[in-house]
Amino acid sequence: MRLPLRFLGLAIVLTGLNFLASGDVQVATGQARPSTEAPSGSGPGAAIERFRITETLKGKRLWDVEADRAEVFEGRGIAVLTRVVHPVQITIYRGEERVICFADKAVVDLKTKDVQLTGRVRCESSQGPRILSESLKWSAGNRRITTDAPVVIEKAGVQIRGKGMEADTVLERMIIRERITSQVTLSGSAEQRR
């Protein structure tokens, strides 16, 4: 049984990165569309529908990524994941706690394993906080979530807005860099503070 060259190239990339493929992974049929992330004239090395990967370390799950479609650009060392019907989903684990992030698009750096989420980004922590932004970055090396974009943080009746943010893996500790405003909702009324 011969595997299509596009699938074999992707299998080598994923195996080399110690990713464990799971779920329904299939090679897309027909001509692959180049992503807007790709330079003119260079298409993806592989295109996959219903994409899911899991990264583990010593048997512990670090993160999962799921997307309707993935395009792998081996020369650039990235995978571009896009929403077709369902948002791209990344789940980041720290022990029993986790953060689930949804976005229209994600770019995974296949070397560093960093993930850049863009378009209607929403992250929800098992600890309770929720983050809304147009762009967030997950850094696998230091296990931090960051953005330079405007951000909204919601938790237990408090809404904090600002620009630029850094947070730990499960959103326990967050730093908002500038233009901070907050709104507290008490028994149906809102009080705004600066």
Image: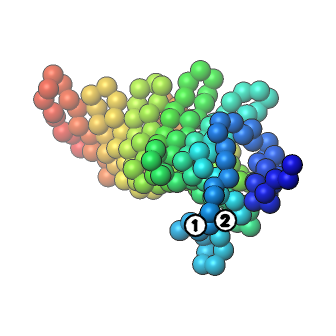
Instruction: Examine the rendering and report whether any part of residue 176 can be seen.
Output: no
Q: Residues within 10 Å of mark 2 (few under 14, many from 20)?
A: many
At label 1, the amino acid type is: Arg
Q: Which residue position holds label 2?
A: 44
Using the rendered view, name the quadrant where residue 128 is placed. top left
Does residue 61 lie above or below 110 as drawn? above
Residue at (67% x, 47% y) in the render: 26
Please provide percent x and percent y for residue 172. 48, 30
Which residue is at the front of the view, 41 or 117?
Answer: 41
Please provide percent x and percent y for residue 132. 38, 44
Look at the numbered discs 1 and 2 and tell me whether their residues touch, using CB distance below 8 Å. Answer: no
In this view, the residue farthest toward the front is 1
Q: Which residue position holds label 1?
A: 33
Residue at (63% x, 58% y) in the render: 29
Residue at (14% x, 26% y) in the render: 188
Q: Which SS class for mark 2?
A: loop
Please provide percent x and percent y for residue 117. 51, 51
Does residue 121 lie above or below 154 as drawn? below
Sooner in the amino-acid sequence: mark 1 or mark 2 = 1
Please provide percent x and percent y for residue 124. 44, 33
Which residue is at the front of the view, 93 or 13?
Answer: 13
Does residue 108 lie above or below 53 as drawn? below
In this view, the residue farthest toward the right is 1
Q: Is residue 89 left or right of residue 128?
A: right
Q: Residues within 10 Å of mark 1 (few under 14, many from 20)?
A: few
Instruction: Examine the rendering and report whether any part of residue 63 can be seen.
Output: yes
Quadrant occupied by the C terminus: top left
Q: Which SS class for mark 1?
A: loop
